[in-house]
Image (cartoon, grey):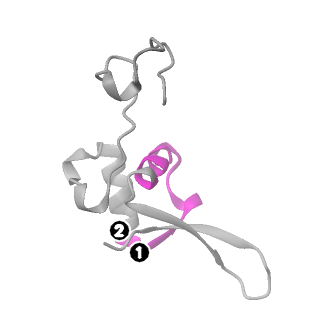
Amino acid sequence: MRYGVNANPNTLMSERSNTKGSHSTHQFRRGEFMPEELTPVEKEVYELIQKSGELLTTDVPVNLRGAVPHLINKGLIEVYKKQTLPWTSKKRKFLRIKDA
């Protein structure tokens, strides 16, 4: 059982309606995704990653980086590590669109 922050302990979070200040915990599945459910910033980041194919996490503009965790939680993009230089063991994080 999950309770909200300021909730009555006798009321479950799933029984309450969304009110001001509460956050939606709905996770999108691949079949449920509707493009109009994205915010303008999320759409911009999604299109940026889609155009480039794969993108270093540090190449996402600073003012758009906050949308990356939202897109990951919605199941639209994924983060993976890849070795960029053959003579070093260091790996860097990349973003790519999840395959449908």
Q: Is residue 3 above or below residue 41?
A: above
Q: Position of residue 30 (x, y in %)?
A: 29, 62
| Quarter of the picture holding the C terminus | bottom left
Q: Residues within 10 Å of mark 1 (few under 14, many from 20)?
A: few
| Residue 67, numbered circle | none
Residues drawn in magenta: 51-72
Between the residue at mark 2 and the residue at mark 1, the CA separation in whole angstroms equals 5 Å
Q: Position of residue 76 (x, y in %)?
A: 37, 60
Q: Position of residue 23 (x, y in %)?
A: 40, 29
Q: Is residue 83 above or below residue 96?
A: below
Tally of marks: 2
Which structural element holds mark 2?
helix
Q: Nearer the viewer, residue 25 or 63?
A: 25
Label 2–label 1 contact, CB within 8 A: yes
* Amino acid found under the numbered disc labelled 1: Gly
Q: Is residue 22 left or right of residue 33?
A: right
Residue underneath mark 1:
53
Q: Nearer the viewer, residue 56 or 33?
A: 33
* Amino acid found under the numbered disc labelled 2: Gln
Q: Is residue 23 above or below residue 75?
A: above
Residue underneath mark 2:
50
Q: Is residue 55 magenta?
A: yes
Residue in the image at 53% along x and 47% along y: 62
Which structural element holds mark 1?
loop
